[in-house]
């Protein structure tokens, strides 16, 4: 797949056609991508009456790769992507302007997981 995470893409077909967004996630096996803020659907969750409450979630569904097109960061036009080998390194190039597509640094946010220790306060029964 020539599209990478963090690339800016344009949507060609569907309800969000003509809009631009950044790629959040890839599904290489099924050739689908998730684009930030696009293809939003509502999912209704039913509560059980005790612990879980009823709510409406907004879910971003994936787009097929055939419905999107890469936007070149240099010439700012929607373009096809070519591959060029320079020695052992493979570089993506824009088919319109011929320049290299340099992927902008995607900020990785470190998420610290809070560990909760369970206390064992169970009383053991003593037999008389």
Image (tube, rainbow, N blue to C red):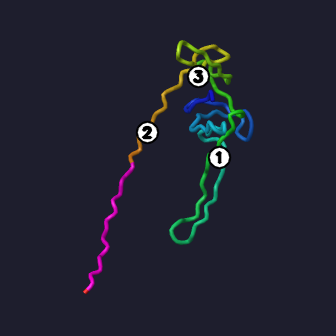
Residue at point 58%, 34% (across, down)? 22
Residue 127 against residue 24 in the figure, above or below: below
Residue at point 59%, 14% (across, down)? 99
- Residue extending furthest left? 128
- The location of residue 100, given as percent across then percent down, is 57, 17
Residue at numbered disc 3: 73
Q: Nearer the viewer, residue 26 or 67?
A: 26
- The image quarter containing residue 110 is top left
Q: Tell me, for residue 109, which label it has, or none.
A: 2
Residue 74 against residue 56 in the figure, above or below: above
In primary-sequence order, the first of circles 1 and 3 is 1
- The image quarter containing residue 14 is top right
In primary-sequence order, the first of circles 2 and 3 is 3
Residue at point 70%, 39% (across, down)? 16
Residue at numbered disc 1: 40
Residue at point 72%, 36% (across, down)? 17
Spatial CA span between label 1 and label 3: 25 Å
Residue 114 falls left or right of residue 24:
left
Picture quarter with the N terminus: top right
**What secondary structure is marked by label 1?**
strand
């Amino acid at each position: 797949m020539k599209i990478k995470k963090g690339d800016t893409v344009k949507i060609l077909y569907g309800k969000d056609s003509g809009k631009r967004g950044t790629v959040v996630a890839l599904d290489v096996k099924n050739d689908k991508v998730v684009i930030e803020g696009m293809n939003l659907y509502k999912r209704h969750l039913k509560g059980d009456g005790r612990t879980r409450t009823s709510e409406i979630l907004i879910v971003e569904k994936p787009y097929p790769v055939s419905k999107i097109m890469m936007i070149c960061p240099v010439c700012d036009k929607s373009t096809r992507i070519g591959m060029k080998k320079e020695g052992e390194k493979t570089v993506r190039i824009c088919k319109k302007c011929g320049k290299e597509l340099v992927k902008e640094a995607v900020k990785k946010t470190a998420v610290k997981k809070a560990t909760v220790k369970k206390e064992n306060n169970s009383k053991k029964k003593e037999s008389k």
